[in-house]
Image (spheres, coloured by chain):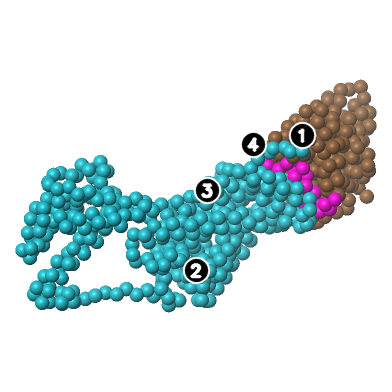
Chain colours: A brown, B cyan
Amino acid sequence: MAAIEAISLTKKFGDLVAVNNLSFSVEEGSIFGLLGPNGAGKTTTLRMIYGVLKPTSGTARVLGVDVVHNPTKAKSLMGVLPEETGLYPRLTAEENLIYFGKLRRMEDWRLRKRVAELLELLNLTDKKYVIADKLSRGQRQKVAFARAILDEPPVLLLDEPTLGVDVMSAREIRKMIEDYAATGKTVVLSTHNMWDVERLCDYIGIISEGKLRYLGKKEDLEKLVGEKEFEDVFVRLVKGDVVES
Amino acid sequence: MRVRLFRGSSGVVKLSRGLGQWGYSLPARTWIVVAWKELLEALRDRRTMLNVVLLPMIMMPLVISLPTLMLSPKAIPPKIMVVVSDEGAMDLAQQIKSLESSSQAQVYIVTGEGDFSNLILNGEVDLVVEIPKGFLRNITDGRSGTIVYYYDPYGARSSVAIGIVQGIVDGYSHTILKERLRAINLSEEYIRPITTVAKQVTAGGGEVSTGEVLTAIVIPMMVGLIAITGAGTFAIDMIAGERERKTIEALLTNPVTRGQVLCGKFLALTALALISGISTVLSSIVGVGIAVSSVEESIAYVQATKLIDPSKIGYFIVGILLTIALGGLTGNAIMVTAASFAKSFKEAQQYIGFLTLILVVPMVAIPYAPQSLYPYLRLMPISSLAMFARDMIVNPGELAAVFTSLAVSLIYLMVFLWLSSKMFVRESVVFG
Ligand SMILES: Nc1ncnc2c1ncn2[C@@H]1O[C@H](COP(=O)(O)OP(=O)(O)O)[C@@H](O)[C@H]1O
Ligand SMILES: [Mg+2]
C-alpha cells in the first residue's frame, strides 16, 4: 500500500487555481520531495494532505485512510511541520512538546522519555525551560521538528523544513530526516531548494502554477540532467517544457 | 536547574512553571489538555492578569466607596464659618459650634459684618452661615428671622454642610415654634395637620437595610459586567491571538476536532471568568461595606450594617457563582464569534470594544428600569443574567422568576456557543 496517494487534488481560491488536479503516490519508507518555486502550490498541496484545508475536488489517502472523510484518523498517522512553526511563544520548549504529545494521546511515561530523548538529540536540553519567544529561528524550527516526530508517526510531512534556518540547525534537521526515514517511515517534504532534494530525496515531484511538471525517481532526473546544469533543467521543467536527454 | 522565565521570580511564574510540569500527568482528554495550555498562557501574560484580576480588586472598593467616603462628614469634616452680626444670636451659633464635639464639622465663629465670599472661592471654607442684624428681634417680635447660606454650587461638600447646619437650625426653629404655640395654647398637630409614614414593601415582607439595597443594586451589575467583559481580553488572545501567531495550523494537524479545541478554550475562559468575577465581587462587597459604614456614622437612618440577609446567603453565593460562570461563557461565546471575524488582534479588539458597549447598556440600565419591565428583561439576552443575579439576591423564593431568568440565560448561552463554533471552524478564518 502507498503511504500517501494524492488523487486529483484541486484547490481554488476564488478564481485562482492554486493546485490543479494533482495526482501522485509515495511509497512507504521513501523520502518524497515536492520541488517548486514560490507560489507553486506546495504548501496548499501539503495542507490538503494533512487535513487543514478541504480540497475543492479530489482527495488524498494516508495509509489507505481518506483525509476528507476520516480526518481525525488520518491526522493520527501524520506528523507535520507546517510552513509556520506555530510554537506558542509564551510556553517553554518542553511545554510546547507536552501539549502536542498530550493532544496525540501519548501516555505520561512515554511522552516524558520521548521529550527528553528528542531535546537531547537536537541539542536543545538546555533550552527545555526557555519560552519559545526567546529561542532563535533555528532552535524554534528544531523544536517544531521534534514536535512533528514526537509520537513516531508512520508518515512525516515537512513544509520547507530548512527554510530560513541557520546552517548548523539545517544540518541537524537534515540528519534527523534521514535517520527518521531509515527506520522505515515515510517522509514528504516541500522545498524550493534543489540541494535539499539532491541530498535527501528518493522521489521527486516538480510543481509549478499548481500543476505537476515532473514525477519520478531522483536517479532518473539525474540521468535526464546528465551533463546539463541541474538548475537549467529545473527552470525548464517549471516552465512546462519537455526536457529530453 | 533553575531558569528564570521573567525578571524576578513572582509567585505567578512559580505557579505557572508548576502547572507546566503538571501537563505530563493530565488525562488525555483533548478539552482538558487545551484548557491546561490556555491557562498556562494566560498566567504567563502578566499584563492581562494585572488588568483583569488585580486592577478590579483594587479599583472596585475605591470606585464604590470613594464618593460616599469623601462626602462623609466624619471622614473629612466640612469647614463652616458662622458670621454673627446679631449679638443676640450667639446661642444659635454655639449650637452650630457643637457640631464639632460630635466631630461632624469644623466650625469657626466670627462676629461683625463683612464679605466672606472670597473664603468660599478660595476653598478655605465650604459654607458661610450669616446671621444678620435684627435676627433675634424679628423672632421675639413674632416674625421670621432670616439666616443666609453662602455656598459653592459645584461643591458637594457645601451641600453636605448645609444639610448638617440645617439640622441644627430646624431644631432651633422647632423650639421657638413650640414656645409660640404654647403661648396661644395650640397643639403642634393643629398647625401640622398631615404626617407621613414610609413603609418598605418587599417580596420577603421584612425590612431591608441600606446595605442590602446597595448589594442588590451593585452586585448584579458588577457581576454581569465582569462576567461579560472580564475574560474578553483572554477570549481575543485565545482566538484571534492563536490565528495571528499562526499557531492554529499546527494545532489543527493533531487528531482533534475543532469542537474539542473550542470546548477546551471555553473551559479555560470560564475558569478565568470565575477568577476575575469572584475577585471583583469580593472587592465590590468590601467597597459597599466601606460606603455603608461611612454613611452610617453620620446619618441615623441606617440601622443595620449587614449587606446580605444571613438567611439568604446560600442563594447569594450560588446565584453569584452561576451568574459569573454563565455570564463568562455567554460573554466569551459572543466575543469568540466576533473575534472569529477578525484577521488580527487589533481588529478583534475593535469589534469587542464595540460589542462590550452594547452588552453593558442593559446591565447598567437594570437598576433604573421600572418593575413592570422586569418580565421582559428576564427574556432579553445578557439582561436575563443580571435579572437572575438580582432575583437570587433579592427574592430567591420567587421560583418562577428565578427559573425563567436562568432558563432564558441557558438558552442564549446555547445559541451563542453554537454560533461561535460555526464561526471558529470556517476555513477562511484560519487561512484567510
Ligand atoms: N488562503 C489563501 N487564499 C488565497 N490564495 C492563497 C491562499 N493560500 C495560498 N494562496 C495562493 O495560492 C498559490 C499557491 O500558494 P502556496 O501553496 O503557498 O505556494 P508555495 O507553498 O509553493 O509557495 C499562491 O498564488 C498563493 O498566493
Ligand atoms: Mg509554501
Relative to A155, B216 lies left or right? left
Kind of residue at badge 1: Gln
User: Residue under circle 3?
Assistant: B55
Q: Are marks 1 and 3 in contact (CB under 8 Å)?
A: no
Secondary structure, mark 1, is helix
Residues at discs 3 and 4 both on one chain: yes
Q: What's the amino acid at mark 2?
A: Ile
- Any mark on residue A150, and which? none
The chain letter for the residue carrying disc 2 is B
Q: Are marks 4 and 2 in contact (CB under 8 Å)?
A: no
Q: Are marks 1 and 4 in contact (CB under 8 Å)?
A: no
Q: Main secondary structure of the magenta part?
A: helix
Mark 4 on the same chain as mark 2: yes
Real-space Cα distance between discs 1 and 3? 37 Å
Residue A221 highlighted magenta (yes or no): no
Q: Which residue is mark 2?
A: B393
Q: CA distance from mark 2 to mark 3?
A: 26 Å
* Percent x, y of residue A135: 72, 34
Range shown magenta: A90-109
Precedes in sequence: disc 3 or disc 4: 4
The numbered mark, 4 or 2, whose residue comes first in the sequence reads 4
Picture coordinates of residue B292, whole percent (x, y)? 41, 60
Give residue B98's position: percent from left, percent from top: 25, 56
Observer-nearest of B220 and A53: B220
Q: Quadrant of the N terminus of chain B?
A: top right
Q: CA distance from mark 4 to mark 2?
A: 44 Å
Q: Chain of mark 4?
A: B
Q: Is residue A96 magenta?
A: yes
Of helix, strand and loop, which one carries label 4?
loop
Residue carrying label 4: B7
Q: Nearer the viewer, mark 2 or mark 1?
A: 2
In the rendered image, which residue does mark 1 sit on?
A139
